[in-house]
Amino acid sequence: MTQTTTTADSPRAIRLEARPDGVGLVTFDVPGASQNTLRPDFGADLARVCDELERNPELRAAVLVSGKPDGFVAGADLDMLKGLTSVDAARQMVEAGHRALDRLAGLAKPVVAAIHGAALGGGFEIALACRARVLSSSKKTVLGFPEVRLGLLPGLNGLQRLAALAGLQVALDHGLTGKNMSPDKARRFGVAADVVPEPILVRVASELALALAEGAALSQPRKSPPPVERLKTLALEKNPLGRRVVFRQARAAVKKSTGGRYPAPGRILDVLETFAKKGFEASRAVEAEAFAELVTGDVSARLVGIFFATTALKKDTGVDDPSVAPREVRKVGVLGAGLMGAGIAYVSIDNGIAVRLKDRDAASVARGLRQVTTLLDERVKKKRLGQGERDQKLALLSGTSDYSGMRQADVVVEAVFEDLALKHRVLAEVEASCREDVIFASNTSSLPIGQIAARARRPENVVGMHYFSPVHKMPLLEVITTERTAPEVVATAVALGKRQGKTVIVVRDGVGFYTSRILGPYMNEAAWLLTEGCSVDGIDRALVAWGWPVGPLTLLDEVGIDVAAHVGPIMVGAFGERMQPPATVQKLVEDGRKGRKNDKGLYLYGAAAKELGRGKHVDATVYGVLGLPVPGRRHKEPYPVEEIQRRCVLQFVNEALHCHGEGVLRSARDGDIGAVFGLGFPPFLGGPFRYADTLGAATLLGQIEALAERHGKRWSPAPLLVEMAKGHRRFYG
Amino acid sequence: MAATGKGKGRAGGGAGNGAARSGKTKADDADAEAAASRTAKGRSKAEAAAPAAEPAEPRRKSAAAPKAEPSAPPPDATTDAAPNAAAKQEAQRAASASRQGPDRIAIVAGLRTPFQKAGTGLRRLRTTDLGAAVVKELVQRAELDPREIGLCVYGQVVPSVDWLNVAREVVFGAGLPRTIEAFSVSRACATSIQALTSAADAIRGGQHDVAIAGGADSTTDVPLKVSARLRDTLMALQKAKTMGARWKALSGLSARDLLPGVPGFSREPSTGEQMGEAAEKMAKLNGVTREEQDAVALASHQNAARAWADGTYAAEVMPVVPPPFDEVVERDNIVRDDATLEALAKLPPAFDRRHGTITAGNASPLTDGASALLVMRESKAKALGYTPLGYVKSWAYAAVDPGWQLLMAPVFAAPVALARAGLALGDMDLVDVHEAFAAQVVANLKALGSRAFAAQHLGRSEAVGEVDPDKLNVNGGSIALGHPFAATGGRMVLSTLRALGKRGGHHALLTVCAAGGLGAAVVLEAP
């Protein structure tokens, strides 16, 4: 009864099946791929199917579906985009894409997109070019423009089509943030004509397509927006003055959030502003130009690089031997119900892993339970989580003040106080009360895992799992292996971290591992700058301007000045003068300054801070403690901003290279991901190794050597850097 | 063959009242024969002697594979010993079932929440929350792989309108595998006894090997009723499509209809009597004095306080942290270690102001709490490496006319359960009587010890027996601990089995009276 008009011998990404009810079923199904992406032949494929659809007199309408079980179309193929090296070639590709979607949008026979799973980027844009969209009510179904996160913008007129359907503000919001639109939202915005259970998706879409072919009008959303919303739309979008307000505000917000370092949001605004002022046609040229510039630019290249790295890490088992498989983890024991312990418990139960949370008494456990529950309740309040889902997650969590219930644990993560004797004690307790093969993971951020494992009866089961605080927000997990850690144990820790939603890098054991170690000389350098007469806020401002989320001295307060003072000598002991801090830190500790934790650090906290109004305020008494003059109103930093930035950043980069040279890292990729996701290294610079490549090894070495001349042994270039400079080598091809 | 089957069945490792069901190993047969010969000599002696042969026995053959009983059932030697027709009938049933399996019903672990006076420490937890909390922690402490569990039988007494099957909600709330099937039971105050015996039935019937049994009640979270008129109006409103229809639906309503109604279950629907009134009646009918009642209450408090002081309850009660997680509830809050007869004597009667003897001090209060037991087939428990707390040997339920003596049914159930166990009251090392009211405890004990009562009501020529006060409610009872209706049975089973272990005893009898004129009795046996 049905016939497939595409030739069977060459599988195409898009095929048309003429169904007896007069509906052409257009199936997007990229051969040999797990998900659909837009590839170079996409335009030609689509045009061919449009031709077939038009030519076939039996067909009155069409439905566009995905041939993949759980995804619609994930967007443009990033490898294809990466291959675009010239602005012209990029512009031509975008323009070809515009024409392909014009063809789809201009068909006389209505095409309805039936969407189950994610329709992102180009996938969303194809759907927007259809006459209407019907969405499955599945949780997997989302729409969105993630391009901005890769330093790009939607290049197939999706912004404009979304603006036309749902209004400028919706298009701005989704274009600038890259956030997902749920089926419910899509229905409310008028983007979806209907939201139905997945099993009847194609049927409903077909019926709609046929009805549209008969000239029926699209149904309106069940609920019209509240009056306030309608007024707002009227005031802000339906007149030129209001639109100007909208764009002015948006530009100000973009400038503030990007610091001018990410070009994509500004170009997204350009496209939409042109669309609003001059119409669709005019905006298309702006879009093509902007896309071509962005896709060939550095920022996008680095963001895409990070994306590729995280994708690769998702597939990486963390061990080199492909025969090693992780053990199954059903239950995790967490020792210590403090901030970290509760955070680890939260990311575990949130992803379906049962947790037994232990602390010394019921009241301490209760604090942990409260923290986890609060995090879940916040999501319920924001309607991101149903009450029932919340209850199911909490059902996986239980607390104890002894080791009962730990025998079923496959992994025990300790998050007790950073004290070697205590770590040894809990390790012995775990070995005594848990299963023989239990994996003992330490969440220490400073103690070498080898020292902890030294007392283990089964050191092959001891591994480091260094989470970052706050655990539920920080995306990185640093897994630390000792020489004795069994590969299977490493793979299990990595797999567990991934299930907890983390990006996981595996590093070799040593003082400070990777992340804490490269932070050391960076923060030291800031302290040195301070002793040389720079102001606290001047240093922080310089590095925030460079792209860090916070400055190094703010970070010092957050990490804890006492912690830094404790770790400092250990680092010097392990790595020598390179890690030498000035006496500053010790003086601050002696003055009782621990940072945010005791509301006393380089900055003011609590009531004292509030008195001075919003924002952060330096505690001016710090200078006196350090024997330095308090910077006055007319204070001028002794060094230019660039110098401050360079000194801190190069220490960071140099130490990362030291690590890599010593084999702490498995790859430069891991080093970049660790710095970006764990420490907040500016993503648009790609990471310390990417940055070294950008500068060039020789230039970098020259700068470090120059600094060494001026500041002495604190600056010692990584042997790896010297080698790379000699061989004119790069970390990335 | 009932008693023989059971007496020896037990001696030979038979299960519960299924003693006779035991397909025994060869090793058992010697015991069986010995028991059979003892039985021939005279029942009570034989039974008194039987336990001596037993203690080490279950472990000895832990690894032995069950075998079908090779020989025909022994001759029925119980006619003379059978206390009544029911027991005889049961014996025959048991005999016919004797080839089905050797396993006893093992209680592997148990746990309860602290029992808290209604509206206090646990007020923020609903019945399902209480049940889920205790079941979750029970499974954790038992170090049990939750995938081993096949069944959850759970109960609540105070009804709830937010779910239909509390047992299933408890499975979800405890984070257990969703493949665990679950059903809810209700037998008023004997609800968790019912949960236990239903689980035991499922195990004996070969349907499951591992079950959770228990019950929970929030007497704080009591659903309030709307008047019938308001309910009808609301239903009509839901259907009304036009303003006119809505107005019409509303117009019949008066202010009085908006008042919430008292839930009907606080009185016996069949008699209109409150349970306290029924107990008051029983006190008068059985000549129970205020002093006797206050003495029971005092012992209850003293024993319960001692059990807390000596660490007994610390091992049976889990700490609960209700939202917002700022306070840990660790202990029962009704029991007093400073209770005195003088203080109890000062309390005014609660139900009959002029001639009454029942006070707030000698009755069990409204209480929030939950309990749970981990129940397994004996062989399964051993295969998983557990040493059970003990076994359910037999049980019986009985019922009386609620208009007669509402709380007297345990006296009818006890001799049947004992007969099914092949034991007499005198063989019990411990007796645990649920204390709904001290008056009921005294009335029950008097009836058990009364030959006249036995003759008139139980069809026996001899009294069921006297209960040694030193063996009675040794860790306190519902008066001092409180009585979350559906949780009490689980609490009694757990506490009694542990006390039995501590004292080196062999058998214990539990009785529970329940609304509607129901009574339950269970015979437990130490491992």
Image (spheres, coloured by chain):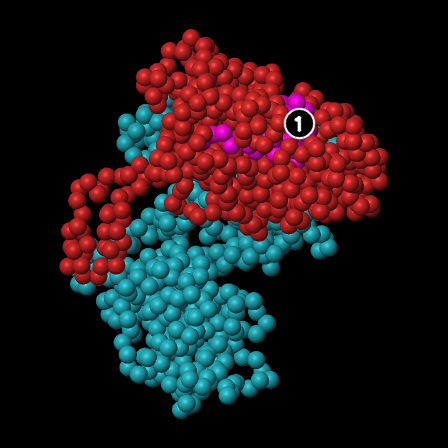
Q: Position of residue B252 (x, y in %)?
A: 17, 50
Subunit that carries the residue with mark 1: B
Label 1 neighbour load within 10 Å: few <14, some 14-19, many 20+: many
Name which residue type carries label 1: Ala
Quarter containing the C terminus of chain B: top right
* The image quarter in which residue A612 lies: top left
Query: In this view of the protein, can residue A702 be seen by the observer?
Result: no
Rendering coords of residue A195 (x, y %): 37, 65
Q: Where B520 sits versus A175, above or below? A: above
Please report the residue visible at 79 percent of the width from the left and 41 percent of the height from the top: B74
In the figure, the cyan chain has which letter? A
Residue drawn at (67%, 34%), measured in percent from left and top? B82
Q: Considering only vertical position in the picture, is B509 above or below A720?
A: above
| Local SS, label 1 | loop
Question: Which residues are the magenta region?
Answer: B406-433
Residue at point 71%, 26% (across, down): B44
* The stretch drawn in magenta includes residue B360: no
The residue located at (41%, 85%) in the rendering is A22
Q: Does residue B282 appear left or right of residue B240 in this picture? A: right
The image shows residue A286, relative to residue A47, as above or below, that is above
Instruction: Answer with the quarter of the image where residue B124 lies.
Output: top left
Q: Which residue is mark 1?
A: B424
Q: Chain coloured red: which letter?
A: B
Place of residue A297 in the rendered image (x, y in percent of width and height, measured from the top left) = 45, 61
User: In the rendered view of the protein, which quadrant contains the N terminus of chain B?
Assistant: top right
- Residue B389 drawn above or below residue B339: below
